[in-house]
Image: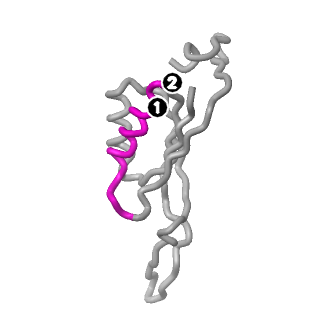
């Protein structure tokens, strides 16, 4: 099992959610996040004063997938979240040693599905 964490643009989330659902991925954890990378934030103007926003809004989407589906799911994320511009985000993949459904005590793949 692998954990995928994708940090994406907020406006790309609905398209990603629909594509993942169509691929049979229903279990997602979604968190509002803020961050900065090469974009270095944005400039804003308030009552004639210019200021720098250091952190930009992002969405963090997490899911657990079987290892044989990893490349397929990564391709879906890239296809649905890429604009080709700085600030599209990052994807992190981590191994998962164990998964346990608290309610039933199920372990492994059965706990995720």
Judging depth in this view, the residue of 32 and 36 nearest the camera is 36
Magenta residues, as a range?
A: 67-85
Does the magenta stretch mainly form a helix, a strand or a loop? Answer: helix
Q: Position of residue 91 (x, y in %)?
A: 50, 47
Which disc, if any, is residue 70?
A: 1
Q: What residue sits 48% from the left and 88% below the top?
A: 49
Count of numbered marks: 2
Quickly name the residue at label 2: 66
Q: Residue 78 in magenta?
A: yes
Which disc, if any, is residue 58?
A: none
Do callouts 1 and 2 mark residues in contact (Cβ within 8 Å)?
A: yes
CA–CA distance between discs 1 and 2? 7 Å
Task: Check disc 1: other Cα within 10 Å, few if <14, some if 14-19, many if 20+.
Answer: some
> Image height check: is 10 above or below 24?
below
Element at label 2: loop
> Image height check: is 35 above or below 28?
below
Q: What residue sits 44% from the left and 27% below the top?
A: 69
Q: Residue 1 in magenta?
A: no
> Image height check: is 66 above or below 89?
above
Q: Position of residue 30 (x, y in %)?
A: 51, 40
In the drawing, does residue 104 fall left or right of residue 43? right
Q: What residue sits 63% from the left and 18% below the top?
A: 101
> Image height check: is 99 above or below 17?
above
Query: Which image quadrant for residue 111?
Result: top right
The colour scheme of the drawn protein is one colour
Judging depth in this view, the residue of 64 and 42 nearest the camera is 64
Q: What residue sits 49% from the left and 52% below the top?
A: 90
């Amino acid at each position: 099992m692998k954990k995928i964490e994708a940090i994406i643009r907020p406006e790309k989330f609905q398209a990603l959610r629909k594509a993942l659902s169509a691929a049979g991925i229903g279990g997602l954890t979604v968190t509002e996040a803020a961050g900065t990378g090469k974009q270095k934030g944005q400039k804003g103007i308030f009552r004639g004063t210019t200021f720098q926003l250091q952190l930009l809004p992002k969405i963090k989407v997490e899911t657990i997938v079987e290892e044989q589906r990893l490349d397929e799911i990564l391709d879906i994320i890239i296809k649905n979240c890429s604009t080709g511009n700085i600030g599209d985000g990052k994807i992190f993949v981590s191994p998962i040693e164990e998964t346990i459904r608290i309610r039933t005590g199920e372990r492994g793949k059965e706990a995720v599905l």
